[in-house]
Amino acid sequence: MLVLEEGPTRSRFRLNQAHTCRYHMQEAGSMVALGPTPFLVAAGRGIGGGSLINSALCFRTPDEVLRSWEGLLGDDRYGPEKLGPVFRWLEESLRIGPAHNDLVAGVHNLKVVEGVRKLGLRGGLANRNTPACIGCGACNFGCPSNGKASVNLNLLPEACKHGARIQADTKVTELLLEGDRVVGVRGRMHDPDTGEAGGWLSARAERVVLSCGAIGTPRLLHHSGVAKRMEGVGEGLHVHPGSVVLCRYPEPVWMWKGATQGSWFESDELPGVLPHAFIAPPEVVALLVAPHLGGMKSSMEVLDHIGGVLALVSDKGEGTVGAYPDGRAKISYDFADEDVDRMKESMVLCAQVQLEAGATELYGVAHGMGAHSDLDSFATAMRSRDIRDFFLYSSHPMSSVRMGRALDAGGKALGVEGLWVADASVFPTSLGVNPQLSTMAVATLIGQGMR
Ligand SMILES: Cc1cc2nc3c(=O)[nH]c(=O)nc-3n(C[C@H](O)[C@H](O)[C@H](O)COP(=O)(O)OP(=O)(O)OC[C@H]3O[C@@H](n4cnc5c(N)ncnc54)[C@H](O)[C@@H]3O)c2cc1C
Ligand code: SF4
């Protein structure tokens, strides 16, 4: 088996957003979904993909989502009973669990947990694939201490023990077709630092599996012209839209110390909404609160006191992924009204949790929100926002080459032979939880079916 990867052979982790974008984000972190509110769509790059730079949160696919897939696909392998052992195997292989102690958890996560407990919500410290985490809060730049069990440290080396070879610094640009059969791929190597193009590489294979992610896979299928032989490639993109509520605590909480985004909660009142602790680079947080605090200088002075909670929404809204002639992704997304309503209510819940945890001031990340010290005035301002007021971002693209539409229930392409997809593209619906564990579980199932 040959694995081709666009990103670098050796991880290039540094505490610097520009550096991370350059080496470890697809299209250098510049992918934008167009629509009523354009927003950035992030996807990882490198041997290990998104797991290199993600926040390491691990949630199983909710049972009700799996039940709906079982029905939609007419395949009981997607039921919670059958998929349970796959999740257990992954949880053991990646040594998934919550922060080992309060120091690793960090004050900011513990504040969120305090608010959650006071309100009697379900939640707490989040399960993460970080068995040796020291709580440095740098997951989104890549783990400097190998405390995170990203898949370059476990599943990929395991594949190599069984004969897989990995060729990095190679971007696949074409699928080789003979009649209606995909018989291989063609790609171009490049220098990881300068980006300078090198030689072409062609590989023939009996079976080709695309795992370029929910943007990368439809982008490649469109760019190589294979999408037109299939149904629905790039349609039905879900993104888990969501936003964030920042707040100010009387004491320092050091958002950047402790397990990255290491706490979560949920409420029966808001099904399909999953809030967790927020993190962004300090310069971004300073910019976001500066308008409420009289400018950048004063926002920098209280930066250690700023906390945040973001919420993702299991979306009914859908988007598309195509390719521009130069091969970059062409993305659009339309918001569903009911998602926007749930997003606003989730912001009110996030505000409530932070007030219970002792926050004295709340800042919604949307135009015209202002600063609020009580829940009622925050909720009134939030509920009167329009989707165009929000500052949004997604790192959870999925469902863009779906099983049940473009693929059969085993991930095999419909319309061409010799081609499979095994990544976040294949989900028949939105998940409502962070996608990495579901991606690994479904990819495992697809792999087992190919034996
Ligand atoms: C900043 C960030 C934080 C996140 N936090 C979490 C979290 O805490 N928990 C969670 O569950 N999920 C999280 N996610 C999402 C999660 O990482 C993704 O859902 C998951 O990685 C998707 O896996 P995938 O296999 O579909 O694609 P990816 O992990 O994106 O892998 C695709 C790979 O294909 C490569 N590739 C793409 N195109 C080509 C090409 N043409 N040729 C060769 N190689 C190509 C890419 O370089 C990449 O390495 C986060 C994502 C990001 C970006
Ligand atoms: S928070 Fe933990 S897992 Fe994340 S980068 Fe730091 S040590 Fe690694």
Image (cartoon, rainbow, N blue to C red):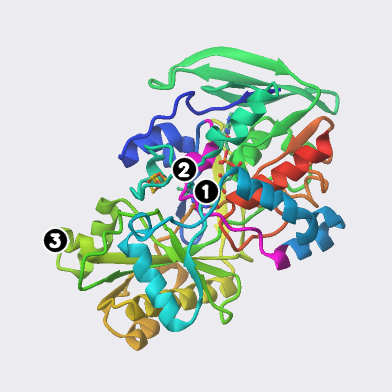
The CB of the residue at mark 2 lies under 8 Å from ligand 2: yes
Which of the 4 image quarters holds residue 374?
bottom left
The residue sitting at 13% across, 63% down in the picture is: 298
**Is the Cβ of the residue at disc 2 closer than 8 Å to that at disc 1?**
yes
Stretch of the chain drawn in magenta: 47-65
Residue 44's spot in the image, x, y percent? 50, 40
Cα gap from disc 3 to disc 2, whole angstroms = 31 Å
Judge whether 160 appears above or below 449 on screen: above
Label located before the other in sequence (3 or 2): 2
Image quadrant occupied by the C terminus: top right
Which of the 4 image quarters holds residue 172?
top right
Cα gap from disc 2 to disc 1, whole angstroms = 6 Å
Mark 3: amino acid: Glu
Judge whether 7 appears above or below 247 on screen: above
Mark 2: amino acid: Lys
The residue sitting at 33% across, 76% down in the picture is: 357
Residue 71 has which mark? none
Residue 148 has which mark? 2
Residue 129 has which mark? 1
Secondary structure, mark 3, is helix
Residue 301 has which mark? 3
Q: Is residue 302 left or right of residue 171?
A: left
Label located before the other in sequence (3 or 1): 1
